[in-house]
Image (cartoon, rainbow, N blue to C red):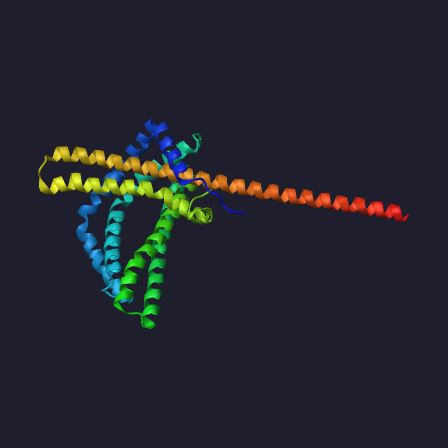
């Protein structure tokens, strides 16, 4: 049976409606996530030295794996990965505490399970979050292995012209973005589904992989607006806070106040992202249940038709037997 999902625009409208309907509680969740968002925004510019060291190490790793330094894609990728790793390591204590506590609060609010123990929600989220970290590492490693095989096989067959490198520079970021985007969608879906399961961890990731099958386009469509919002807030922080700090055209108090406000805005987008992922998870579950009911109804109809046909055959056989007698 074909999987029919709810329209992404409807999920986004329901998410925004839920966000505004519970705004007084959402602000509490955003306040809990504020240390994480502030640490994440501050970590990007102030860890450039450590990211440059990681950038050099990753470039050496790519060259050792057989990737040519003339591939601009891998230079850009190693720079982005080094910045992401440096920022993630710095914000790891905040993400394991404030971010997960905020998500646990939002999921408990939306699931209407107010009697459940909050510590159980948090522990399941923590276990799944750690497993998601290794899952994302595996997704990156799989992408690199795929590129390594593709580049070396194609070069072995003589595809080493300038047009070939141009084609690889264009196609590789697209393929890598699709792989990582799907990995992030699966990890987010596993995270919001962990409190409803008996235990978090890799079982939730496997469950998310099954739920996302045939629905990846919908998942990517609903993930795009919140990620664009988060990227916009990061750009706003760079322009309004860091630019003013380095230029020195404003006093430090006003910069700190505006930076706090922008960090809180970032936290609100994180809460909205949790709401979107949770409602998408509920939509997937509802769709699976509807399909199960549809299959059961179809099976029962087939049984009824079969029983009706058997009854007709039995009646016809009885009539023929009476005529013979």
User: Residue, x 25% and y 34% (percent of image)?
Assistant: 264
Q: Nearer the viewer, residue 77 or 291?
A: 291
- Residue 263 percent location from the top left of the image: 23, 37
- Residue 137 percent location from the top left of the image: 34, 54
> Does residue 121 show up?
no
User: Residue, x 26% and y 44% (percent of image)?
Assistant: 91
Q: Nearer the viewer, residue 227 or 268?
A: 227
Would residue 273 be found to the left or right of residue 246 on screen? Answer: right
Instruction: Say above or below: 164 vs 192.
Output: below
User: Residue, x 29% and y 42% (percent of image)?
Assistant: 228
Would residue 176 be found to the left or right of residue 246 on screen? Answer: right
Residue at the right extreme of this rendering: 325
Q: Quadrant of residue 150?
A: bottom left
Q: Nearer the viewer, residue 84 or 294?
A: 294
Instruction: Say above or below: 169 vs 95.
Output: below
Instruction: Say above or below: 191 vs 180.
Output: above
Q: Nearer the viewer, residue 262 or 303?
A: 303
User: Residue, x 31% and y 43% (percent of image)?
Assistant: 227
- Residue 210 percent location from the top left of the image: 47, 49
> Does residue 292 show up?
yes
């Amino acid at each position: 049976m074909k999987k029919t999902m709810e329209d992404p625009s409807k999920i986004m409208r329901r998410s925004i409606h839920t966000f505004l309907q519970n705004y007084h509680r959402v602000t509490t969740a955003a306040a809990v996530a504020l240390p994480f968002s502030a640490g994440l925004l501050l970590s990007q510019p102030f860890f450039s030295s450590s990211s440059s060291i990681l950038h050099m190490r990753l470039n050496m790793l790519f060259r050792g794996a057989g990737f040519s330094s003339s591939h601009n894609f891998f230079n850009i990728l190693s720079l982005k990965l080094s910045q992401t790793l440096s920022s993630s390591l710095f914000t790891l204590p905040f993400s394991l505490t404030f971010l997960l506590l905020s998500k646990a609060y939002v999921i408990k609010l939306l699931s209407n399970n107010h009697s459940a123990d909050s510590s159980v929600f948090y522990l399941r989220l923590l276990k799944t979050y750690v497993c998601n970290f290794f899952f994302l590492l595996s997704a990156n490693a799989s992408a690199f292995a795929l590129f390594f095989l593709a580049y070396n096989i194609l070069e072995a067959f003589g595809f080493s012209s300038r047009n070939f490198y141009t084609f690889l520079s264009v196609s590789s970021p697209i393929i890598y973005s699709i792989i990582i985007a799907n990995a992030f969608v699966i990890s987010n879906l596993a995270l919001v589904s962990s409190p409803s399961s008996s235990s978090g961890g890799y079982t939730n990731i496997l469950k998310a992989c099954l739920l996302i099958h045939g629905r990846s386009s919908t998942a990517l469509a609903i993930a795009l607006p919140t990620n664009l919002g988060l990227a916009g807030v990061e750009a706003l922080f760079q322009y309004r806070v860091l630019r003013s700090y380095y230029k020195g055209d404003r006093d430090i108090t006003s910069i700190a106040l505006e930076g706090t406000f922008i960090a809180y805005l970032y936290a609100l987008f994180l809460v909205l992202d949790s709401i979107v992922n949770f409602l998408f998870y509920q939509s997937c579950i509802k769709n699976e249940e509807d399909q199960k009911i549809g299959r059961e109804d179809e099976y029962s109809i087939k049984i009824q038709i079969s029983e009706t046909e058997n009854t007709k055959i039995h009646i016809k056989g009885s009539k023929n037997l009476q005529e013979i007698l």
